[in-house]
Image (cartoon, rainbow, N blue to C red):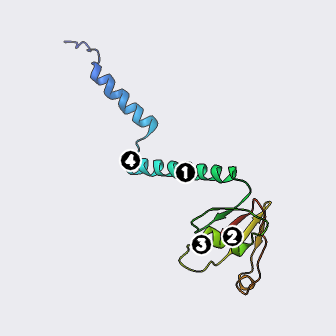
Amino acid sequence: MILKVRQPMKAWMWLALSLCAALLVTGCVSKAKHREDVKKAFLAGQSEATMRMYKSLGPSVTFEGEVRQPFVPWTRELTLAKAIIAAEYCGAQDPREVTIIRNGENLTVDLDRFLAGEDYPVAPGDVIRIK
């Protein structure tokens, strides 16, 4: 009976096993997923920088929804109608819902009354959500 002597593992085998173990532990990310993650991070950073810039300019009103200018400087004369015009609403259709968020409270705007001419005052720090 002949016994075979086990040969030591070669360096390239260790490298291959190490790479396989690393992939199992960390997972594999596709190029598309990586691009999506990079794009999300870029947009989040851009949004954060824009918010900081506008906040440094003084009191403002913030918009959520389809507007070109998400931050409108607040003045004593600013009303909801003037703020929407300044924010440059760009939705494909008329808004279905407008909400003013003030100090954590949601104030739903009656669109029929608003479109009939009743306007609402806005306060610094208000968030106006347009859907």
Q: Is residue 130 above or below residue 21?
A: below
**Which numbered circle lies on residue 83?**
2
Q: For the residue marked with disc 4, what is the amino acid?
A: Ser
Precedes in sequence: disc 3 or disc 1: 1
Q: For the residue marked with disc 3, what is the amino acid?
A: Tyr
Q: For the residue marked with disc 1, what is the amino acid?
A: Gln
Q: How dense is the environment of label 4, judged by Cα within 10 Å: few (below 14), some, or many (20 and up)? A: few
Q: Residue at x 42, y 47 (%)?
A: 34
Q: Position of residue 30 (x, y in %)?
A: 38, 47
Nearest to viewer (mark 4 / mark 1): 1
Structural distance between the alpha carbons of marks 2 and 4: 43 Å
Structural distance between the alpha carbons of marks 3 and 2: 10 Å
Q: Position of residue 98 (x, y in %)?
A: 69, 74
Q: Is residue 46 above or below residue 5?
A: below
Nearest to viewer (mark 4 / mark 3): 3
Could you tell whether 75 is left or right of 9 in the image? right
Structural distance between the alpha carbons of marks 3 and 1: 20 Å
Structural distance between the alpha carbons of marks 4 and 3: 37 Å
**Which numbered circle lies on residue 30?**
4
Precedes in sequence: disc 2 or disc 4: 4
Label 4's element? loop
Q: How dense is the environment of label 3, judged by Cα within 10 Å: few (below 14), some, or many (20 and up)? A: many
Residue behind mark 3: 89
Residue behind mark 1: 46
Q: For the residue marked with disc 2, what is the amino acid?
A: Ala
Precedes in sequence: disc 4 or disc 1: 4
* The residue positioned farthest toward the left in the image shown: 2
Label 2's element? helix
Q: Position of residue 123 (x, y in %)?
A: 78, 64
